[in-house]
Amino acid sequence: MQRPDWLRLSWPPTRQVGGIVGTVVAGAVLLGASLIGTPDERPAASVPSPTASPTATPSPTATPEPTSSPTPTATPEPTPEPELACPLNGLPIPDRRLLRDPALAVQIENHPQARPARNLGRADMVVEATVEGDVTRYTGIYLCRQFGGLAGPVRSGRYYLIDLWRDVRVLPYMFGAGAETVRRYNRAGMPFVNGISGRWPYFQRFGNAPAPHNLYTDIGTVRDAFRTDPRLRERVREVGRLRPPFRFGREPLPRGRPVRHVEIWTNSYWHFGWTWDSRQRRWERSEAGVRHVDAGTGEVLNARSIVVQLVRETVVRLSTDPGGFPRRYHHLVGEGRGVLYVDGKAIQLRWSRPTARDRTIWRFSETGKRVTLPPGVVWWEIMPNYARVLETPR
């Protein structure tokens, strides 16, 4: 394949490793008694003084007994509710109602003319996979964050969305798909939203990029429509219950290899990378050596964990894109190798998914234990097993 003019080659000199409180205050009442004073005396007369009658002693006033105060009852401390976490990344979320809707899996373009992506950095998880020509496309999965504004550019769906729906139970959301791709969606019974058909009102052109690289959607509007649009409600019922692909916690991780930068090459000209930022404890994204700053957030795209899944890939020559390039089919049922990039190190993984009805299970190669990731955004990289994954040590 001839190298396009809009990409530049930057081959990294690195090694190759394969082909994420009340207090109740009580007071006591004090009661006192009053005393009666003696009468005033008169001057004595010149006649003999009579025998004085004894002065009556006033009766004492009874002092009332103090009223005892009731013993205060301590107010029990309220039992704090467990912190609610997003099932896709383990990060805390403020409102359980955010989880009543399905996770929206939006196809977002990674063509150089479509960059920078807008609000991809607000996705709770991102899946990246190769498409025709071994270039890559994003699937931004939105569930736990509320925000306004457009996300995109939105592009067409690919075969791997069937596996993503079956595995994780998300609602695929796209603009267009090949005829054979749509047939496979329908045969699988997969619910989806295709903006190019059905007159869905949730897409709009935005910005100065030429079509088709200028199509966006408002995630907040779509999520609100889950309760007002009958067609969307029908698809919501068909999605099924979310099955998060990863577990999150504070469990110790295997030692792994110290890594400062990882670069993934899918062919001789298409490559992207991740660089570990130890101060912010995150991986930062670059495209062909250039930092990818999100147009919506103003921040470089970043992740706490990066999971690279190496899979067998088939070129589907009977199904091509408008440019004539054949589609890619990823074999996501079976088992294989992977790498976890987290906390500035690389840890070898194994993945397995016996049947299409099953979930993908991830284990550490060294210990055989199920993978538990630290809370934080995850990028799931579905890459062909011939891709070169190159590491620069720390």
Image (cartoon, rainbow, N blue to C red):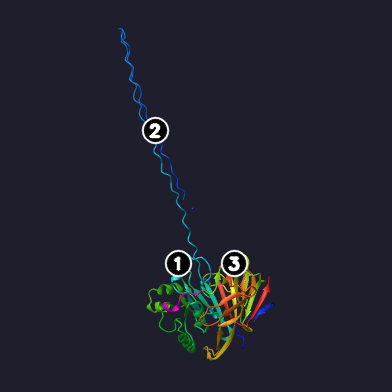
User: Residue 93 at what x, y percent from top left?
Assistant: 49, 66
> Which amino acid lies under the numbered mark 1 shown in the image of this protein?
Arg
Q: Which mark is residue 251?
A: 3
Q: Is residue 345 magenta?
A: no
Q: Return the residue nearer the eye: 244 or 220.
A: 244
From mark 3 to mark 1, how far is it between C-alphas? 25 Å
> Which amino acid lies under the numbered mark 3 shown in the image of this protein?
Glu
Q: How many marks?
A: 3
Residue identified by numbered label 2: 32
From mark 3 to mark 2, how far is it between C-alphas? 66 Å
Lower position in the chain sequence, tag 3 or tag 2: 2
Q: Which mark is residue 194?
A: none
Lower position in the chain sequence, tag 3 or tag 1: 1
Q: Secondary structure at mark 1?
A: helix
User: Residue 135 at what x, y percent from top left?
Assistant: 58, 83
State whether residue 286 is above or below residue 318: above
In the image: residue 248, left or right of residue 236:
right
Residue identified by numbered label 1: 96
Identify the residue at the far top of this view: 47
Q: Is residue 242 magenta?
A: yes
> Which amino acid lies under the numbered mark 2 shown in the image of this protein?
Gly
Q: Are marks 2 and 1 in contact (CB under 8 Å)?
A: no
